[in-house]
Amino acid sequence: MGSPDIRRGRVVAVCMSPNHGYPTYPQEAVTVGSLGIVGDAHSGYMRESFTRPGTMKPNDRPISIVADEVRAEMSEKFGVDIDPGDFNEQVLVEGLGDLSDVEIGSAITFESGVELKVTETLNHVLN
């Protein structure tokens, strides 16, 4: 059995908002709890279902991670300034590529010791 794919990157921004909607706002620091980022609207036990609007489901994705490389590419492609938080992400990282090859079930570990499990990817949503 091979070793897991280990890559090193850097956190560019951590973002949150107490209100649902766009954007989230960059913070100096955040506290990650068992239900997501403390104080962020995306944390909690339940979330609204996008496939069944008006219904709730267990919150399986309280923290979203976006690659800064994608943010920069979209800014250039569309000729607009896309700032950290404009994708409604909680964590913006660089140096890990566009994250399209990260598999569901993978673990992302930060220097602080926080470990997040990947439960959904954009590729999974689009396919």
Image (cartoon, rainbow, N blue to C red):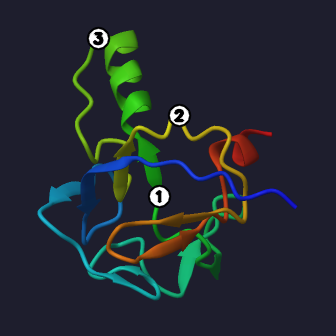
Residue denoted by label 3: 79
Any mark on residue 126, and which? none
Question: Marks 1 and 2, how far apart in space?
Answer: 14 Å
Q: Quadrant of residue 69?
A: top left
Q: Secondary structure at mark 2?
A: loop
Work out whether mark 1 precedes mark 3 in sequence or the reverse, and give the earlier one: 1
Question: Marks 2 and 3, how far apart in space?
Answer: 19 Å
Q: Secondary structure at mark 1?
A: loop
Q: Quadrant of residue 28?
A: bottom left
Question: Marks 1 and 3, how far apart in space?
Answer: 24 Å
Amino acid type at circle 3 is: Gly
119 lies left or right of 61: right
Identity of the residue drawn at 41% across and 76% down: 114
Residue 117 drawn at (x, y percent): 60, 70
Identity of the residue drawn at 81% across and 56% down: 2
Residue denoted by label 1: 64
Q: Against 51, is 80 above or below?
A: above
Q: Nearer the viewer, residue 78 or 32?
A: 32
